[in-house]
Image (cartoon, grey):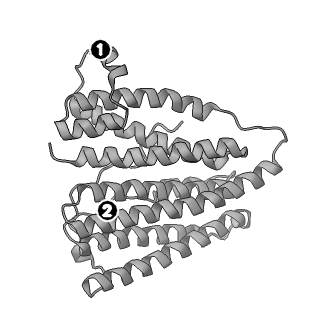
Amino acid sequence: MRSEPLLAIEPPAPVRNIGELYAIALTLTERAAQRYGKLAAASDEAFAPVRRVFEALSQREEERAEAIEKACIAAIGRAPAQADLRWMPMELVLAEELSDIENSLLSATYGAWALAVRHRERAFIFWTYIAARADIGIVRTAAESMAREALRDGNLLRRERRLAWRAERRDALAGDAPGATELSSAALLESLLLKDIFRWSQDAPAPQRRHLLSLIGDGSQMSEENDALPRAEAFDEIKRRALRRAEQLSSIYLDEADKAVDPSRLELAQQLAAHSIARLADLRTIASTPE
């Protein structure tokens, strides 16, 4: 189970206008194209299968950059500019992750697609942050659109990852059936998350409290249990931990859906992933609402 958050650093400030938003989007996309392009240019023949993955990824990011520029021109009459940036966007496609793929003697296409999926998951989280903190409607709408695009793109990449996993599995030893460890771990994490959401609701303003309780029912079943626990934790720490756990669960369910070969298991994982992603977006919105 992943223990580290997908997005280690939150965006430092709300996006103030649509030009700034497109400048952020273009910066992120150009970085991704450059880093994927570096691996696409690798000359080692043993790396050739993985290189083709990064050739496809680099092309996707170049096409995304063109689409962002066109959208910005349509919105404000010019392309995005570095002068529009008030803060430098954090890294979503990490150089060290790509370096691990490049330098590993065991690099495989599944690992390359899996890394690309992780990058788009990170982009989804990033844009939900931006949307939740936006003060201007047009910025919020555009950020939500970019989050949906990251989610759709991630789904396409997961299909490629699934195909690669199945191909590599056919080449591996027969009879290695997928286990249930991830979903078993998720069950415990779900329980911990529900307790965190309930504790969060107890110190939240009334509108936020109602919204939080709607995510777990009315909370009556947990009330007695939580009243018996010491409440020494800081309110902000409870919120951060709940968001981190919600993010981990979304990642677990998406991974489980990719690995599933049984139709009923696939359907369950997809349903859990959809619910978890919607819950994460709700929690991000609540966390960013002024108290």
226 w.r.t. 91: above or below: above
Q: Are marks 2 and 1 in contact (CB under 8 Å)?
A: no
On residue 168, the disc is: none
Q: Nearer the viewer, residue 11 or 52?
A: 11
Q: Which residue is located at x 42 percent, y 70 percent?
A: 29
Residue type at mark 2: give it.
Pro
Q: Residue furthest left?
A: 291
Residue type at mark 1: give it.
Leu
The residue that mark 2 highlights is 89
The residue that mark 1 highlights is 229
Question: Label 2 vs label 1: CA separation?
Answer: 40 Å
Q: Secondary structure at mark 1?
A: loop
x then y, percent, for residue 83: 22, 76
Q: Quadrant of residue 222?
A: top left
x then y, percent, for residue 266: 65, 46
Q: Which residue is located at x 68 percent, y 52 percent?
A: 105
